[in-house]
Image (cartoon, grey):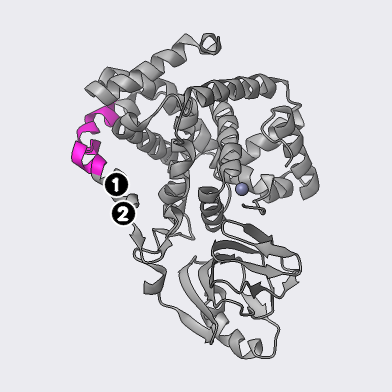
Amino acid sequence: MERATILPAEEQRVTDMQSIAQHRDQAALARLFDHYVPRVRSFCLAAQPGANIMADDIAQEVMIRIWNKAHTYKPESASLNTWVFTLARNARIDYLRKNSRHQSDIDPEYLWRNVVDENADPFKDAQQKRDQERIQQGLDKLPSDQKQVLAKVYLEGKTHKEAAEELSLPLGTIKSRVRLALHKLTIYVKR
Amino acid sequence: MIHYHPSIETLTDYAAGSLPLAHSLCVSTHVEHCQECQQQIRKLEMLGSHLFDQAGTHSRQLNHLKDRFFTQLEEHTLEENDIEKHAQEPNSNHWGDYNIPSSLRQFITKSYDDLTWLRLSPSFKIATLYNEEGGAQIALTRVKAGAHMPTHTHTGNEITLVLEGAFSDESGVYRQGDFINRDASHKHKPIVTKDAECICLTVLDAPIEFTGWFARLLNPIIRRYHPYSRA
Ligand SMILES: [Zn+2]
């Protein structure tokens, strides 16, 4: 069964989300804090090495959103990790656009809101877990050059073009590494 | 039926959050119409979550941060009502004949008609939504049914997203939701289909240069509306 592949710790975190939504359970929030805050901080420091204050601010913002939006999280439509990743991603974008030299008024809240909460059904639920598993297992087997580019794009917040400049490689090489990786993870099926 | 999608690179940068916001705005608007890209992004976000999970954890002591967070938690707690209000905001936005995509509602609070349109010819209007400082120009273009859009080349990358109606050029026909990315080398002559007017979202990384006779008159106007030319 699909369910069996979910780690108990992850199940516990989903239960914690429910306790937060239903009972405003601060102990549950504290457990999520211990798990996610170090990850959100690393995620921020990957983009801005040494920016500890920024990392703390964003981590706090993510925890506030977990606290206030726990009731909107639907386990059938996305794993908790994916949900928190999207919160962290959006909070990081929001912080950078407000604090960088070239500020932007484009509010990221409007740009990603609908992507994750699709109408969930049991079929999609099973599908979602299969995809999840395939990606996780595939990721461990990726060659390091492919993984390196994915890390630049996802964790360091670089575009393909910026990744190419930084690694002194042609843009085409970067693109094909990412495509190869996405193929192996069965994320990208050519249309 | 949507035929033109963002490239897999663009979708990956979007899901990762590394795509410039102006471009993300176009992807987001496309995705509202496109199930296929929604699925793709869902998977790309899953990948992001695994990389995020494995990102490693710095060993810094977080007790101080945690104490501060929990002492201030009350202040950050939204009342039930606030949450409800917030959640309902985006739904109540149907004015006039057209549905405004939710990604654009931060700039268009009422209807397309209520924007400030600058008439560049009897059949061609443009409304600036936002000029990013040192960045992209985000605008809507509105062209009458059957009309030619002025021939132009770009000095930078241009993304066009069809919001209403349809247009065609040498390479194809573009309909609602289609996402068209053109680089500086491209020179095209779009024509709007005869049945309806065409409204497009356009994002320019640098000002476009019109190359036609009448466009030469327009160039100073376009420049005036682009951030780079104010300097
Ligand atoms: Zn699409």
Residue A161 higher or lower than A22, as above or below: below
Does dot 2 land on a helix, a strand or a loop? loop
Q: Give residue B85's position: percent from left, percent from top.
A: 24, 46
What is the chief secondary structure element of the magenta stretch?
helix
Residue B45 is covered by the magenta coloring: no
Q: Mark 1 belongs to which subunit?
A: B
Residue A30 higher or lower than B186, as above or below: above
Q: What amino acid is labelled 2 in the image?
A: Ser
Marks 2 and 1 close (CB-CB < 8 Å)? yes
Looking at this view, name the residue that lies furthest to the front: B195
Q: Give residue B212's position: percent from left, percent from top.
A: 70, 86
Residue B36 higher or lower than B172, as above or below: above
Q: How far apart in space, not on screen, are marks 2 and 1 (Cα)?
A: 7 Å
Magenta segment:
B67-84
> At x 47% / y 26%, what residue is drawn?
A121
Residue B68 is covered by the magenta coloring: yes
Q: What amino acid is labelled 1 in the image?
A: Gln
Residue A13 relative to residue A160: left or right: left
Whether labels 2 and 1 belong to a single chain: the reply is yes
Q: Is residue A2 visible?
A: yes
Give the labeled residue for mark 2.
B92
Give the labeled residue for mark 1.
B88
Q: Mark 2 belongs to which subunit?
A: B
Of residues B147 and A35, which is closer to you in this image? B147
Identify the image quadrant of residue A14.
Answer: top left
Q: For label 1, count other residues whose C-alpha is less than 10 Å away and answer few (under 14), some (14-19) or many (20+).
A: few
